[in-house]
């Protein structure tokens, strides 16, 4: 019987995907973009073996699409809907960064003061640590060791939770290098609490969630009855779906302990892209890359990864991985588009996935095309689940100004539109049944090409 479980679970997912959740009423102007997004989400569930997911998109401050896919509870066969609450993982850092911004504006938080000014109980280290360094992952405070992410101990306060790492030696002098650390954000939450003069969760509720209207976002308290909270899952070797281990996230609210809906996340993002919540000067602090001591940029501000998309549009984003959850939040501040995706297990959701959903909602961008001919048939490989070398064929025909593309894998044969080459770079939006289901990005050097097919590394050779 055990060998049949993955097939049964996958069949159930496909059934649910065929019927959108009842509460959908797409805005007419965005209907084509929504249909493309549905195909992207469906592919993630089918290829990633994800039990349940949700997506939302906001455009110019308005939530134009939110929908659930798959199951919030496999055992009870409860569908995931737009109301389902998922763990948002490290996207909690972006949400907490808003509290940091508010305290800066109120003159209650000095980003460059030693953390002991706000948390005097935190042991002094060989070098001083500032809140700015905590928020940018350049403080030298370590990340999880071993199975610490599976901790089940309840901590009454954010300060109590610091005991896990507070006596450890710094990994390096603050500012010497970038090293991602959720524990640094645990300490940052204690800084926020002290600067606000209010318990951290209370300040987040009153100053961020209530003000923005994030009515479904809260701390992931295990002992509370939280309506519409999903069950949490993980995949064992062979693709079998299991219940995720029990964890208590009370040690890391700011680092990754909140739950919420995708609609709440895009409302949050919209509040940042619209006027009124944080000042533009404050957002620039959060959304500007920090620099190491040697002057090199980190690509991370305070609670946000910062950069540009494939067309050069400004993007701020954050991913989230938790026990039984995956998240991604992407903002295009200059274009007013926000995308959020959430899942109740590990899922292949990264920058390129969120971008594929966002792109049809964005205004078109003129592309500088210094053309080079990449036509031909390429034999490609990419990792798929437990197969590190899944075969694919990429056929590029025509001219760089007007390529036609056919991409074939084990599970699909699809055509490409918006396909072009610029210098050594080739790009195609992959289309199935008239809708975008992903993207191919390749750098072509002679008869070889390397890049990505959605989230998977793609390697190709000209036949």
Image (cartoon, rainbow, N blue to C red):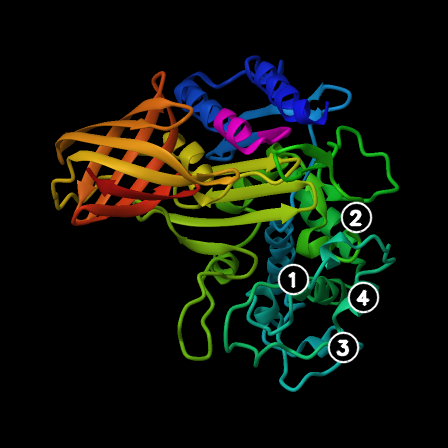
Q: Earlier in the sequence, mark 2 or mark 3?
A: 3
Classify residue 357 by image quadrant: top left
CA separation in Å, label 3 and label 4: 13 Å
Instruction: Give the percent coordinates (x, y) of residue 49.
Output: 58, 31
Question: Alpha-carbon distance for marks 2 and 4?
Answer: 19 Å
Mark 4 or 1, which is nearer the eye? Answer: 4
Magenta-drawn stretch contains 294 = no
Foreground disc of the pair 1, 2: 2
Boundaries of the magenta span: 42-54
Q: Residues within 10 Å of mark 3 (few under 14, many from 20)?
A: few
Under tag 2, what secondary structure? loop
Q: Earlier in the sequence, mark 3 or mark 1?
A: 1
Q: Nearer the viewer, mark 3 or mark 1?
A: 3
As helix, strand or loop, the secondary structure at mark 4 comes to loop
Which of the 4 image quadrants contains residue 24? top right
Q: Split into 4 quadrants, where in the image is the C terminus?
A: top left
User: Which is more N-terminal, label 2 or label 1?
Assistant: 1
Above or below residue 141? Residue 347 is above
The image shows residue 195, relative to residue 274, as above or below, that is below
Residue 103: assigned label: 1
Give the number of the mark in front: 3 or 4.
3
Q: Which residue is mark 4?
A: 159
**Element class at badge 1:** helix
Q: Residue at x 57, y 26 (%)?
A: 66
What residue sits right under mark 2 in the picture?
247
Q: Nearer the viewer, residue 318 or 413?
A: 413
Query: Of helix, strand and loop, which one carries label 3?
Result: loop
Query: Looking at the picture, does residue 423 appear above or below residue 180?
Result: above
User: What residue do we see at 67% from left, 56% from top?
Assistant: 255
Residue at figure coordinates x 60%, y 36% from the top left = 342
Instruction: State left or right for residue 391 relative to residue 50.
Output: left
Mark 2 / mark 4, whichever is N-terminal? 4
């Amino acid at each position: 019987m055990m060998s049949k479980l993955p097939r049964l679970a996958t069949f159930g997912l496909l059934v649910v995907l065929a019927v959108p959740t009842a509460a959908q009423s797409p805005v007419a102007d965005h209907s084509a973009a929504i249909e493309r997004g549905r195909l992207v989400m469906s592919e993630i569930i089918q290829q990633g073996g994800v039990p349940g997911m949700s997506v939302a998109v906001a455009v110019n401050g308005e939530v134009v699409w939110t929908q659930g896919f798959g199951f919030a509870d496999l055992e009870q066969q409860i569908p995931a809907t737009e109301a389902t609450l998922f763990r948002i993982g490290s996207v909690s850092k972006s949400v907490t960064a808003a509290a940091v911004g508010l305290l800066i504006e109120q003159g209650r938080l000095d980003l460059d003061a030693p953390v002991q000014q706000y948390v005097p109980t935190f042991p002094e280290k060989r070098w001083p640590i500032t809140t700015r360094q905590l928020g940018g992952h350049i403080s030298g405070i370590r990340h999880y060791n071993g199975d610490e992410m599976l901790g089940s101990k309840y901590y009454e306060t954010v300060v109590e939770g610091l005991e896990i790492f507070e006596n450890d030696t710094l990994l390096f002098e603050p500012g010497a290098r970038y090293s991602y650390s959720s524990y640094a954000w645990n300490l940052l939450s204690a800084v926020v609490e002290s600067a606000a003069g209010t318990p951290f969760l209370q300040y987040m509720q009153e100053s961020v969630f209530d003000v923005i209207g994030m009515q479904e976002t809260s701390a992931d308290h295990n002992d509370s009855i939280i309506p519409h909270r999903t069950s949490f899952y993980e995949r064992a070797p062979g693709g079998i779906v299991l219940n995720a281990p029990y964890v208590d996230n009370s040690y890391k609210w700011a680092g990754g302990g909140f739950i919420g809906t995708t609609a709440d996340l895009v409302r949050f993002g919209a509040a940042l892209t619209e006027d009124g919540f944080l000042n533009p000067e404050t957002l620039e602090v959060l959304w500007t890359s920090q620099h190491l001591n040697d002057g090199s940029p980190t690509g991370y501000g305070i609670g946000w990864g910062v950069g540009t998309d494939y067309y050069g549009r400004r993007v701020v984003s954050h991913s989230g991985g938790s026990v039984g959850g995956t998240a991604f939040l992407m903002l295009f501040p200059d274009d007013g588009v926000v995308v959020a995706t959430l899942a109740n297990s590990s899922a292949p959701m990264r920058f390129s996935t969120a971008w594929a959903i966002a792109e049809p909602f964005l205004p078109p961008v003129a592309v500088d095309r210094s053309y080079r001919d990449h036509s031909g048939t390429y034999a490609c490989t990419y990792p798929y689940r437990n197969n590190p070398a899944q075969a694919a064929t990429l056929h590029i025909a025509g001219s760089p100004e007007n390529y036609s593309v056919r991409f074939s894998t084990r599970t699909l044969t699809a055509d490409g539109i918006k396909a072009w080459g610029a210098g050594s770079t080739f790009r195609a939006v992959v289309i199935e049944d008239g809708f975008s289901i992903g993207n191919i990005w390749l750098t072509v050097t002679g008869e070889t090409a390397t890049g990505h097919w959605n989230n998977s590394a793609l390697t190709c050779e000209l036949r």
